[in-house]
Structure formats: C-alpha cells, structure tokens
Image: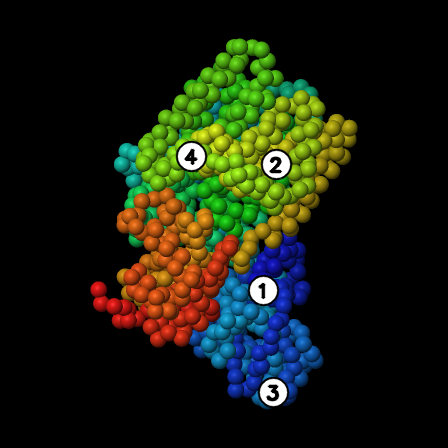
C-alpha cells in the first residue's frame, strides 16, 4: 500500500477543516500496513528511503523502530532531494533511550513549504553508540521509492509515515485548485462555447432549455465537434493544429455575442412577463440548482484530486493515447506514420480522445502525458454532466431527475471515475458526447417534422461520437430501436403520418451521419481493422462463444453497485405501471446493448466488436437516468405536500449523499496498482536520454493477451520511446493490433519474442542469440518489475541478468535497473 496515498484520499473532506486548524497537530499519512522484517542500523552503517511527499508542509516522519542492544546514542535523520546530495533540506534526532518497544516513533523538523509532490531521500544513521532495528517491507509495497542500505538501493521499503502541517496542506491545495480552475476554463473555451453556438444555430428549440441543460448539451456537442474537424482538416490537407484552439472558440464567441445582442429585447420582455403560478416551480428549480451546484463541485474535486499524484497516465490504453496525442501535436493534426515511437505507417483507429488531448497541449503547453491525464478527467466530468438534459427530459422538466443522474454517475457509481485507472479514454470520449446524440435523436423523433438544421447537428454529434469510439455507433442504433419498439407505439399510436415523420427524421439523420463518416470509412477500408470487422460479419460466432460472453454479466455488480441496480429495477417497474414508456425504453436499450454481441449468430454488423465489458462499464448512464427519474417522482410528491421544508430536506439529503459519495470515491484512483511509470522510472528515463546512444534499442517486459495473439508491456519500459526517446520491443497496442507495420513481419515478431522469453531466459545462450537477432542493445526493468497488468508473467528479473557477464548494469536506482547488452558476444553476420 502506498504510504501516503490514503492520506491523499482523506484530504477531499479534510480540506475545509484544515483551514481553521493552524494550531493543530500534523496530519499523519498512513504507513505501510505490514512490518515484515527488521534491518539493523549500527554506528558504522546507513540506511535510507526515497519517497514522494504528497502535500505542502512536510514536517515529520514516523519510523517503525525497535530498540537495539544499546541505546547511548541517537538516531539521526537527514532529508535530501536525492541520494547524491550533500546538503540536507531538513534534519532531526531521536534519542535511542526514548525507544520503549516496537512501534512508530516521530522525528520532526520545520515544515517544508515547497514539499508538495517533490521527491526526497530520507537518510538515517547513528550518532554515538547504540543500534536500532528499522521496520521494513517488501519492495512492491510502495511504488514511489525504495529502501537504501549503505547508499545502495535494495528490493525493499522502509516502514514509514510522512506527516504534514495542516495549514500548509490547505495553502497547497488552494494553489492546486486554481490550476484546476484553469483546466476547466479551457474546457469552457474548447467545448462549451462551440457547442453552445452550434446548439442555438442548428436547433430552433434550444432556447427552451434551462441554462444547465444547454451548458451540458454544449459541452457534449463540443466534444463531438473536434474529431470531425480533425478529419475534415486532414481530408483537405490543412494542418489546423493550434489554430483549432483559438479560431473555433473565437468564431463561436462572436456568434454567441451577436445572437445575444439580437435577442436582448425579447428576453427583457419575457422577464417582465407574469409567469402565472410558476412560483412553486421556480422555488423547486432554485432548490435543485443549489443541490446541483454542490454535486458538480464535489465531482470536480474528486476528478482532479484523483490525478494529482499521477505523473504519467496509468495502465496500457494510456500508452497508445499518449503516443497518438504526441504525434497529432507534432503533425498539426492527423498522421500516418507513428515514427519515431513505433514502426507503423497508417492510422485507422479511433482518434477522438488523442485529438482532444492535443488541444490541451496546444492551449496550455502541456507535455502529452499530463495533457492525457487532464483531458481524461475533463471528459469524465463532461460525461457525467451530459446526463442532466436527458434526465430532465425523461422527468418532463423536473430538475431533480438531472441532479440525481449527475449524483449517481458522478459520486455513487465507480464508473466512469474508475476509467482513470485503466486509461479507458477512447470510450470515455464517446460517452461524453453520447448523451447529446441520444437527446437529439429523441427530440427528432418527438417533433412532428423533420428539420434539416437539427438533422445536421444530430449527424455531426453522431459522427464525432463514432470517431471517438467506434462502438458508440451501436449504442446509438440500439437506442433508436428501443425508442421505436417501446416509446413510439404510445407516442405515435396508429397515426401513419407520425410514424412516417419519425422514420423520415431517422432516415435523414442516418444519411447525414453516414455522409460525414464516409471519408473516414473510405480511409479505413482495406486496413487490418476493417478486415477484422468484415471477418466478424462473414464468420459470425458460435453459440458457445456467445454464451461465454453473456456469462461475463455476472460481474456487473463490480461496475455498478447492487443498490443502484435495485433502484433502477424499481424505477423500471414503476415506470411500466405509470406507462412512462420513454423510461421503460431505457431498460430496453440496456437489454439490447447487452444482447448485441449475440448478433454474431445472425452475422449482425459490428456484433463481434461489441464486448460485454464495454457495455457493463457504460451502464452507469441508464442507471443514472433511471435513478434520477425515480427520485424526481419522489421529490415531486414531497414538494407537493411539504413545500419549503421538503425542498430543504431534498437539498440537504442530496448534498449529504454527495459528500458521502465523494468520501467513498477516495479509494477509486489506484496508481500503486495500475501505474506503470513511477517517479523512479521518470528519473531513469532522464538518465537514459542523457547517457545512451540515440540508436539504442531496449528489451522491455511484457506479456501476451487475446489467447496469445497480441502482446502488451508490463512496466515503464513500454513508455521508453515517448519518455526517453529510445526504441523498445513493445509498440502501442492500437498499432500492434490494427495498423500496418513498416516491416510486414514486425507484429508477428513482437508477439513471438514475448512467447520465447516466457520459456527461456534472455541470459541463456538461446536468449542472447534472440537478443542479437532483435538488435537489442539494452534491457530495462522498471519500478514495477514487469508485474503491472492482469494475468502478467514476469519475463526476466534483475537476478537473471546479474550472473551473465554480457549484461552490464549501468543504472540502478530504487527498483529500476538498466543493463547494457554486450553485442560483441553476438555472432558476426
């Protein structure tokens, strides 16, 4: 367990209290939970620990100690910024005579006002006579450092707890909050302004929506806009790049200001009008707005707080998204060549999220890893907020449905917050714009006529959603089918005219969406990705495979809490009783999505691409809407009978539940488990860039997936091309599976190399011949030791290479090892 991560999670709710605790004791970060062995420290010995301070105001360290045989001297602590420093940043002493038994003992020093997120080396030695036993743990229990004995790293960790000064924590978090505000301001600039302009330009009834409905719709539409713009720019040969950051929002702002000026008189007249008996509705909306503001603030805090201790995006999907964002940034738009990061020469995979990350790189000058983290959390916020308009529409304008939809998805459900651990950003980008697409489709079916302007807007959003995540196409199709089967018979009745109008509206939307997506479809045609989809249609699937896929739904409670599933079931039952068919259609939509994979039995297009897992981690959307609708029914009943008191109870209970949800969400981000690149890895990457040849090629850890058909990396070595500028043996997964390599045999060789190293050591004669054939010059073993991933098998360990003279260890800090492979041992070609 990360020794400071639990304290980070607590800080969400502690921050307000800390503002008034200037005289209170320091905040203690949780230490490693299990002391496993003792390390003896005598006067002629030294020990240390590298770590990362989580907050501003580092003021003490608790060490797990046991008295030694003599206690005449004292334990001396020196704090350095790295192990090679000579001048300490802080120091402290602890008389050995004060040790009474095994336990944590505190060494205090003046609070450091600049310690937040900084790396330190804690050095320990004995002054005078005496000795002491230091508690220690296994190396994998802490990811941001390692135990040092005699100034040399060992595979272990000191058992310790950092402590922080409360007022300094509060000041540091306040400074970080200003940075979060900047990230949100850029989101407004990039997404909300263009989306707002498009909504009012192309949708005649947009003015009838509440301000938050329009804002949420605008953000969702804005997310869908940029993949389409990147595609069009590439189609006409324009490298938009940085211009998209400024030109698109500027044009949107000009239109918004012009439109506001034109409608100023009409709005003033509307404000002077008498709303009749709308007083209770305004009171209801005001109370809901207060609750909404509190919930949205909590969602913002939880999302950005989750990434403050993460330097590089976590798990495997993040590798490909970050490389793609970097190439888009370098190329000013879409690209073909993945070089210098991977030897591939096509781009056919979904690209919406990397395009959005590149926008943040241009807007704020961010490096690609940070841009991916920030863009991912911004989209996480937008995906939650985007549920509001559909929820209020389901509840016929009752805002409590929207408030609770945001609450459920944002704070009570682990999804989509958990996406930060997986780097599941392509799906997240699709889900951020999907609610707007569904709202607009439903609106088109509900109105009595097909409108070209609105159809263009719907088509743009659907096309952008599909370019962000191809599977979103099937989400939209399933929603349309659910509406036609469940909602339309009640809404249209036996009116042939209504049915004709609705079907014509859908046909027009499908035609325009297809036309917008067609250039990219032509681009993808003939690629390995297209061949995979075509093969799925041609081959279909076996009943056994379909049943196995459906069986994975037993894991649904891992992604949606059973309580929320139960509330959703109650909502569906109540909706059916009340004949609220639009709500029942949500249940039908979820069922259709769950069964879409079974369409392989009838060769349904795209059925082989629709994973049950992708659907399960999206179920927070219908669950949020169903829970929100049911609460709106209860809220309406409460408000009718209790007026003001009922509204107060609703606001307080909603915000209180949101605070509880934020508290529970503290355990969602888990870089200790999912993080591949740690602070020690970043230091190693800098060393590699400065101390290895530019043409070096690194053997890195990895393991096979998809029944051995592909392979992925399993520690920071996977990131070497991007972070250190050096080639490695593991390309991004998107490229390996879907793109054309420069060498036709490259993808096969990548997987075969991993398969061979699963059974032979690279230090064996056969293994060294393999490395010679692969052109390997160096070997990288990261802080994660090749053990990051699901079902991972470590390919090689430091002890495997240490005994072979052909491997020269040229770098070793913390748990990171870099070996130079002596190619003079390779046979002459």
Task: Describe residue 87's horizontal placement relative to residue 635 as left or right.
Answer: left
| Residue toward you, 600 or 783 | 600
Image spot of residue 770 (x, y percent): 33, 63
The image shows residue 316, relative to residue 403, as above or below, that is below
Q: Which mark is residue 3?
A: 1
Quarter of the image holding residue 718?
A: bottom left
Can the viewer see residue 692 in this picture? Answer: yes
Per the image, label 1 sits on a secondary structure element best described as loop
Q: Which mark is residue 157?
A: none
Q: Which mark is residue 624?
A: 2
User: Which numbered disc flags the more N-terminal residue, 2 or 3?
Assistant: 3
Q: Closer to the observer: label 4 or label 1?
A: 4
Discs 3, 4 touching: Cβ within 8 Å: no
Marks 1 and 3, Cα distance to the nearest angstrom? 28 Å
Image spot of residue 451 (x, y percent): 45, 18
Quarter of the image holding residue 615?
A: top right
Task: Describe residue 34's horizontal placement relative to residue 705 as left or right.
Answer: right
Image spot of residue 676 (x, y percent): 47, 58
| Residue toward you, 631 or 273 | 631
């Amino acid at each position: 367990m990360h020794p400071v991560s639990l304290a980070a999670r607590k800080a969400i709710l502690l921050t307000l209290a800390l503002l008034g605790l200037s005289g209170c004791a320091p905040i203690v970060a949780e230490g490693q939970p299990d002391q496993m062995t003792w390390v003896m420290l005598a006067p002629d010995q030294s020990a240390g620990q590298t770590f990362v301070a989580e907050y501003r105001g580092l003021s003490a360290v608790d060490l797990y100690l046991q008295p030694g045989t003599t206690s005449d001297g004292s334990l001396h602590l020196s704090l350095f910024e790295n192990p090679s420093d000579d001048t300490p940043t802080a120091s402290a002493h602890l008389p050995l005579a004060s040790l009474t038994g095994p336990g944590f003992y505190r060494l205090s020093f003046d609070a450091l006002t600049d310690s937040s997120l900084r790396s330190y080396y804690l050095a320990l030695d004995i002054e005078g006579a005496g000795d002491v036993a230091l508690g220690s743990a296994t190396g994998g229990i802490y990811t941001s450092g390692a135990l040092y004995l005699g100034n040399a790293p060992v595979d272990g960790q000191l058992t310790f707890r950092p402590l922080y000064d409360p007022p300094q924590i509060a000041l540091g978090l306040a400074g970080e909050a200003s940075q979060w505000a900047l990230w949100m301001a850029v989101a407004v600039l990039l997404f909300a302004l263009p989306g707002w302009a498009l909504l009012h330009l192309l949708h005649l009834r947009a003015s009838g929506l509440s301000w938050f409905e329009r804002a949420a719709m605008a953000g969702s539409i804005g997310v869908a806009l940029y993949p389409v713009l990147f595609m069009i720019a590439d189609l006409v040969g324009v490298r938009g790049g940085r211009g998209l950051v400024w030109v698109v929002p500027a044009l949107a702002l000009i239109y918004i200001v012009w439109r506001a000026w034109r409608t100023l008189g009409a709005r003033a007249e509307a404000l002077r009008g008498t709303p009749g008996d709308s007083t209770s509705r305004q009171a209801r909306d005001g109370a809901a707005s207060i609750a909404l503001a509190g919930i949205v603030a909590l969602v913002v805090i939880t999302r950005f707080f989750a990434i403050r201790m993460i330097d590089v995006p976590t798990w495997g999907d993040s590798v490909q998204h970050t490389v793609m964002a970097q190439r888009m940034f370098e190329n000013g738009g879409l690209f073909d060549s993945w070089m210098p990061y991977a030897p591939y020469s096509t781009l056919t995979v979904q690209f919406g999220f990397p395009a959005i990350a590149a926008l943040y790189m241009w807007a704020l000058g961010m490096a690609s890893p940070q841009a991916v983290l920030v863009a991912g959390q911004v989209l996480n916020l937008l995906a939650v907020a985007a549920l509001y308009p559909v929820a209020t529409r389901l509840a016929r304008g009752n805002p409590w449905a929207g408030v609770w939809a945001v609450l459920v998805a944002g704070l009570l459900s682990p999804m989509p917050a958990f996406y930060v651990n997986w780097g599941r950003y392509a799906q997240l980008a699709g889900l951020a714009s999907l609610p707007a697409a569904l709202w607009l489709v439903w609106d088109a079916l509900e109105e009595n006529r097909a409108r070209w302007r609105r159809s263009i807007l719907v088509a743009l959003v659907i096309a952008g959603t599909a370019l962000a995540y191809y599977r979103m196409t099937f989400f939209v199709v399933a929603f349309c089918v659910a509406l036609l089967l469940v909602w339309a018979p009640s809404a249209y009745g036996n009116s042939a005219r209504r049915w004709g109008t609705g079907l014509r509206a859908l046909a027009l939307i499908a035609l325009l969406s297809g036309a917008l997506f067609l250039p990219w479809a032509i681009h993808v045609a003939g690629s390995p990705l297209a061949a995979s989809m075509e093969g799925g249609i041609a081959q279909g699937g076996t009943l056994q495979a379909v049943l196995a896929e459906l069986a994975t739904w037993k894991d649904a409670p891992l992604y949606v809490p059973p309580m929320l599933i139960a509330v959703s079931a109650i909502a569906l039952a109540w909706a059916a009783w009340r004949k609220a068919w639009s709500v029942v259609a949500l249940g039908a939509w979820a069922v259709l999505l769950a069964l879409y994979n079974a369409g392989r039995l009838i060769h349904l297009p795209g059925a082989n691409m629709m994973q049950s897992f992708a659907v399960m981690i999206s179920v927070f959307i219908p669950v949020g809407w169903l829970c929100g609708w049911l609460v709106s029914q209860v809220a309406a009943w409460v408000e009718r009978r209790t007026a003001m008191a009922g509204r107060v109870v609703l606001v307080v209970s909603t915000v209180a539940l949101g605070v509880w949800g934020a508290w529970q969400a503290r355990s969602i981000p888990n870089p200790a488990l999912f993080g591949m690149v740690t602070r020690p890895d970043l230091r190693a990457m800098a060393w590699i860039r400065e101390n290895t040849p530019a043409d070096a090629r690194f053997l890195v850890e990895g393991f096979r997936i998809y029944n051995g058909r592909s392979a992925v990396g399993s520690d920071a070595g996977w990131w070497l091309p991007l972070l250190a500028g050096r080639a490695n043996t593991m390309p991004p997964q998107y490229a390996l599976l879907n793109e054309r390599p420069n060498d036709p045999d490259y993808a096969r060789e990548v997987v075969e190399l991993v398969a061979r190293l699963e059974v032979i050591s690279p230090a064996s004669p056969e293994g060294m011949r393999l490395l010679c054939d692969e052109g390997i010059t160096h070997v990288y073993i990261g802080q994660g030791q090749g053990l990051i991933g699901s079902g991972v098998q470590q390919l090689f360990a430091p002890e495997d290479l240490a005994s072979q003279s052909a491997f020269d260890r040229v770098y070793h800090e913390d748990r990171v090892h870099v070996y130079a492979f002596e190619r003079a041992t390779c046979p002459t070609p």
